[in-house]
């Protein structure tokens, strides 16, 4: 079982700080570049294309793009970026409650043809009722997962070819189909830590995603979902969502992690924790429990740092250490059954290079990657003489 590496597209803004998109003076709505925090980058297509091209060159298989109020639309952004890349896949996040399942199936089929098969789907049921209501969705937490269950039943049914009928509580479809089903079918990624989420993952998910919890907690989740899937007669693969800070030495990496906290006042952390504490997401509550809102003891497991979660919702932990340390932790998660690693870092362009040039060669040397993409600098030059490469950082 090889490791599959994916990177992240910060379509809500990026920068050298954890208060990235919140640093916009207008809350991110107008993408104002006048901000109280330096180093903030607007998510324009030119910058996102730099990240996408870097991810492809470094050997990442795909990039995840988020969904939500403060993000650019994932479908439109990634199909534009597909024109700037050749092989890179796009893990497109979307909310099933705000789009017809038949239309989503049709969009996915069109996307696959336009990009020649480079679509992956990340289904986000949603754990924040305030955010959901902003999009016109008024269901409660558990009913949202019940609707996602029906949604994915319809999508897979419509992809099957013949006209598909469905009569459920949330969707009623007569003769649903896609004129040309997608080829290949996009893999479906899905996450959720609640009792309502588990059965949905077992019935429909190709890859179950968890946020970066300590290995023993991740193993419990894997065992839980694997057991549910076996009862459905299915096999589910597993992935994990983490940030990374890897450097040539462990000391450099931890210094970089600590610098990310320099811009965070106690008031900023308290306000973020209060807002995140209102989330209905069980996964979000598990993230908050890892640090309890305190800056003390943020290394919650060897090389696993919870500092990101002091202000960021969702994925709140980072792998921090030397390139070898980070490779060790990836190998540890891989041994538990984690196959897909969806990674990110601040800023996303620079951290992609730190990981790609430092950790990826280490993982390849351990036999965890199917192949290491060849760099133009390591290919023989014309005439057979090798290019000389200066020592790196």
Image: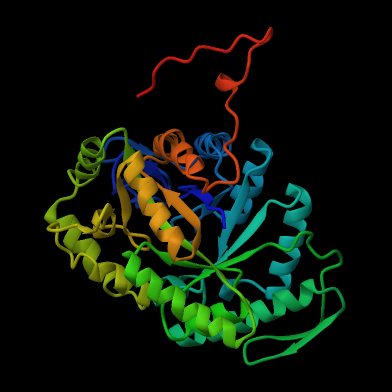
Q: Quadrant of the C terminus?
A: top left
Residue at image position (55%, 86%) is 146
The colour style of the image is rainbow
Residue 87, percent across and down?
A: 67, 42
Examine the rendering and report whether any part of residue 11 can be seen: yes
The residue at the far front in this view is 366
Residue 30, percent across and down?
A: 43, 47
Residue 314, percent across and down?
A: 37, 63
Q: Is residue 380 above or below residue 349?
A: above
Residue 13, percent across and down?
A: 41, 46
Which of the two residues, 351 or 108, is positioned nearer the viewer here?
351
Q: Report which quarter residue 183 is drawn in.
A: bottom right
Q: Quadrant of the N terminus?
A: bottom right
Q: Report which quarter residue 347 is drawn in.
A: top left
Which of the two residues, 262 or 160, is positioned nearer the viewer here?
160
Residue at image position (78%, 71%) is 159
- Residue 124 shown left or right of residue 287 in the figure: right
| Count of labels in the image | 0
Q: Report which quarter residue 42 is drawn in.
A: top left
Q: Is residue 179 above or below residue 49?
A: below
Q: Is residue 182 above or below residue 177?
A: above
Residue at image position (52%, 46%) is 367
Examine the rendering and report whether any part of residue 140 can be seen: no
């Amino acid at each position: 079982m090889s490791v599959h590496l994916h990177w992240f597209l910060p379509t809500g803004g990026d920068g050298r700080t954890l208060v990235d998109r919140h640093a916009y003076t207008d809350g991110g709505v107008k993408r104002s570049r006048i901000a109280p925090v330096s180093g903030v980058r607007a998510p324009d297509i030119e910058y996102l294309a730099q990240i996408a091209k870097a991810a492809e060159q470094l050997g990442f298989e795909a990039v995840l793009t988020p969904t939500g109020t403060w993000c650019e639309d994932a479908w439109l952004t990634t199909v534009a970026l597909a024109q700037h890349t050749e092989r890179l896949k796009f893990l497109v996040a979307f909310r099933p409650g705000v789009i017809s399942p038949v239309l989503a199936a049709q969009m996915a089929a069109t996307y696959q043809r336009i990009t020649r098969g480079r679509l992956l789907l990340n289904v986000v049921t949603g754990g924040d009722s305030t955010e959901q209501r902003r999009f016109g969705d008024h269901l409660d937490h558990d009913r949202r997962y019940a609707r996602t269950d029906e949604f994915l039943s319809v999508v897979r049914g419509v992809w099957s070819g013949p006209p598909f009928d469905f009569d459920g509580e949330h969707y009623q479809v007569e003769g649903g189909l896609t004129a040309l089903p997608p080829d290949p079918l996009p893999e479906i990624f899905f996450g959720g830590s609640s009792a309502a989420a588990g059965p949905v993952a077992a019935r429909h998910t190709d890859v179950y995603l968890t946020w970066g919890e300590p290995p023993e907690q991740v193993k419990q989740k894997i065992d839980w979902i694997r057991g549910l899937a076996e009862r459905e007669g299915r096999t589910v693969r597993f992935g994990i969502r983490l940030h990374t800070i890897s450097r040539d030495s462990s000391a450099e990496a931890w210094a970089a992690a600590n610098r990310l906290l320099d811009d965070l006042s106690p008031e900023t952390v308290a306000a973020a924790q209060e807002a995140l504490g209102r989330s209905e997401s069980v996964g979000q509550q598990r993230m908050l429990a890892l640090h309890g809102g305190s800056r003390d003891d943020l290394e919650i497991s060897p090389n696993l740092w919870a500092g990101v979660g002091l202000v960021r919702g969702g994925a709140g932990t980072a792998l921090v250490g030397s390139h070898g340390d980070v490779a060790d932790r990836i190998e540890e998660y891989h041994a538990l059954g984690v196959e897909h690693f969806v990674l990110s870092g601040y800023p996303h362009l620079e951290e992609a290079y730190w990981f790609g040039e430092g950790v990826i060669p280490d993982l390849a040397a351990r036999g965890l990657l199917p192949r290491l993409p060849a760099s133009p600098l390591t290919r023989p030059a014309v005439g057979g003489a090798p290019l000389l490469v200066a020592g790196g950082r």
